[in-house]
Amino acid sequence: RVALQAQPAGPRGKFIIKIFKDRQIFYIGNKGNDMNVLVIGNGGREHAIVAALAKSPKVGKLYCMKGNAGIAELAECVNVDYMDNAAVGDWLDAHKDVEYTVIAPDDPLAAGLADELERRGHRVFGPDKRAAQIEASKSFAKSLMKKYGIPTAAYEVFDDYEKALGYVREGKFPVVLKADGLALGKGVLICEDLAAAEAGLKQIMLDRAFGAAGNKVVVEEFLTGKEFTPGEEVSVLTFTDGKTIVPMIPSCDHKRALDGDKGLNTGGMGTFTPCPFYDKEVADEVIGKILLPTVAAMNAEGCPFKGVLYCGLMRTPEGMKVVEYNSRFGDPETQVVLPMLKTDLLEIFEAVTDGRLADVKIEWEEGACVCVVLASGGYPQKYAKGKEITFDCPPGKDVFVYHAGTVRENGVLKTNGGRVLNICAKGKTVAEARAKAYDYIKCVHFEGMQYRTDIGIKYNAKG
Ligand code: AMP
Ligand code: GLY
């Protein structure tokens, strides 16, 4: 399925190798005035970023730290712990051919990897540690929104279990409990009654189920949707250099593990774009009341945000409200958004780094894209790794597979995480893309494979 083709020499006397894989063209190798790029991360989001960069004629060799079995087909995987800022810095210092680094996950951003690499003179895509607080501390994000009048659910913050309990006992149900820090998208508990809230507070604050993320807890009002229950949500990711914002196409995530939005919260079980309720009026409201004020607020607080700002929003009877901010691309939102990007991704990244995003025209394909996550049995709780993955047939036109938790051992592809593969498809409508993605899933097998069968049918999604 992979055909290699050498092209004539580029400007620096090097040659281009085009890989035709699954009917897509990726450029690998040196193409002259090209740039070698390191991507930090190892999930489906990073595979989508690496694939988008591999389509750029400006990108030379790609590296990924740590990568996975799918990424390894497009990039050289580097086995360095990206949570060790000094180790990443040392690797880049020793690899002078790598001129640009993209930090995709939240935890190295929160740990100040961008600061460390910039201090050593490397060019980086991703916010610094202070700006990354917008995701890493929910209490920081909530007080930012309160101070600058950005619409969000009413809340209180507690670092004392007894006080939190007292507050919850006096309040309304359902109530939402959120561990303050990073918890892989799992630190949010929606409690229907007092018993559940008491158990939840104990889990977060006393048992430390989410570790130090539970040093503080945010107790939040439960938001309801304008038309749907649970409320309708949209993920709006925006490129920003702190001066200009360029929102990406909106997408809808499915955070719960089971069909019908049942089960536990996960990192995300599937996504689709476009978002059915996101019309021009909603987009204008989001830009005017949320995106621009957030970027301005970060500037006013002395921690300008440069990178991808992710706003998880709910459409409520009072208008659009922020449910969460992230300081990075979403996973699996990126897997449906980047395939629709027509503009060169490296060009956008560099413009953000250099503070000239206003000069870049960013264009998107028409149509829809759907991503279904294939997860290990048991996810988001305990699950097994090391199960062999097999494909009966290659993906058809406009169907593509991003790897998340996979590894190749002695030539055998195996599961290596909770979310294993992302099966994505494009179509004229969400319905068409969804049909193609689910059709291909019939060809994919591993023991314990679990997925939602209803990705892309909420909010009356059609096209
Ligand atoms: P978060 O990690 O903050 O995005 O929360 C995970 C999910 O929990 C969200 O996508 C919502 O579906 C739900 N959620 C979080 N906060 C609220 C809220 N205040 N009201 C209703 N649902 C919420
Ligand atoms: N899909 C949700 C996230 O990336 O946080």
Image: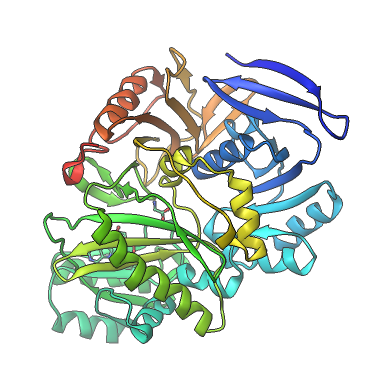
The chosen color scheme is rainbow
Q: Does the rendering let one see residue 137? A: no
Say which of 125 and 212 sits in front: 125
- Residue 86 sits above or below residue 373 on the image: below
Which quadrant of the view contains residue 399? top left
**Left or right: 409 in relation to 36:** left
**Left or right: 162 in relation to 396:** left
Residue 32: x %, y % from top left: 81, 36
- Residue that appears at 64% across and 53% down: 102
Residue 195: x %, y % from top left: 16, 69
Say which of 100 and 247 sits in front: 247
Q: Does the rendering let one see residue 331? A: yes
- Residue that appears at 46% across and 64% down: 182
- Assign the N terminus to one quadrant of the image: top right
Residue 34: x %, y % from top left: 76, 41
> In this view, which residue lies farthest toward the right?
13
Which quadrant of the view contains residue 444? top left
Say which of 455 and 257 sits in front: 455
- Residue 288 sits above or below residue 23 on the image: below
- Residue 263 sits above or below residue 423 on the image: below
- Assign the C terminus to one quadrant of the image: top left
Residue 30: x %, y % from top left: 79, 33
- Residue 459 sits above or below residue 213 on the image: above
- Residue that appears at 22% across and 84% down: 167
**Left or right: 222 in relation to 72:** left
**Left or right: 396 in relation to 90:** left
How many numbered markers are drawn? Answer: 0
Which quadrant of the view contains residue 127? bottom right
